[in-house]
Amino acid sequence: MLARLCLKSDKERLIGACQNLHDLVYIYVSSTNTIFQLLSAHLGTSFPIMPVKEHFSIRENLQLVVSALKEMQATVETKDKDVRGSINHSLYGMIADPTTSLQDKIAAVKEIYQNYKDTGALIAVMLKHGNLPDTVESAFHQLLTSPALSLQVSELLVEYADILKILEQYETSGTTEGNSSSGTSQQFRLHSPPSSSSLLVFLQTILQGQRSIKKSQKIAADYLEEAFSVLKPPCEGFQTFVKMVETCVLAITDKQKET
């Protein structure tokens, strides 16, 4: 996914950024579902598995993720309060501290489990201090006004020919007044299409004024790559955190087998 950012032409940048954002939405939702499955298995919660809503926008899908994570956070905070006093203070600090190395966290989890045999409670402590809703929402809010987030997820897997077809709806409107003989430029305006799409709305929003098709591709790619660059770090952090929790749960499972 990350390698697609290093593309050369604006055409490739545009298609690559669309694909990257599509992948990113699926990773956010998949990571959320993994957390919900762990909580269901070990804490008895009943958070529903989330599908990616292809006909919703990026913004709407991320809003659903943030909303679900906030609901999850409320549940794990309640559980955390119930168990905090029952766990050794220093060991609790080790599993709660996001800077604790994975090796030290696993060691702490195993030691705690010997006396406090509740895998769900340990997951809750880690999730409570993971601050997942705040991390995702913070990045999301940086892009609240970005037109890129208005794109439907289903339209992110668009073929270049489809994008070009929309851009070609711009027709030459003549030369600008006062152009020199050597500086004549073509300009474009969009016809009213028979049916709207989020891609069309996106292009209408960012291409205010009259632009060449070549310039249009660059502007669109810039907006999409900006959105991806903001949303990528918390997504990768989310993935890493989920893998850490899964590794700790596996360590507890191995500990159970030893007893």
Image (tube, rainbow, N blue to C red):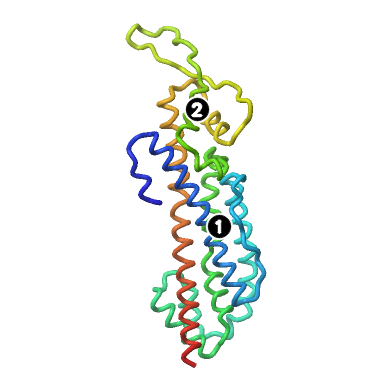
Please state which of residues 97 and 115 is positioned toward the viewer in this rendering.
Answer: 115
Q: Quadrant of residue 183?
A: top left
Depicted 90 relative to depicted 127: above or below: below
Callout 1: 10 Å neighbours few (<14), some, many (20+)? many
User: Residue 182's x, y, as percent?
Assistant: 32, 9
Q: Which residue: 56% across, 46% down? A: 58
Q: Which residue: 46% across, 68% down? A: 243
What residue would you read off at disc 1? Answer: 29
Q: Given the current orientation, which residue lies at the most extreme bottom position?
A: 259
Q: Amino acid at mark 1?
A: Val
What residue would you read off at disc 2? Answer: 165
Distance (Cα) linking label 1 and label 2: 31 Å
Q: Amino acid at mark 2?
A: Lys
Please state which of residues 233 and 200 is positioned toward the viewer in this rendering.
Answer: 200
Q: Quadrant of residue 233?
A: bottom left
Point out the frontmost of discs 1 and 2. 2
State left or right for residue 12 relative to residue 23: left
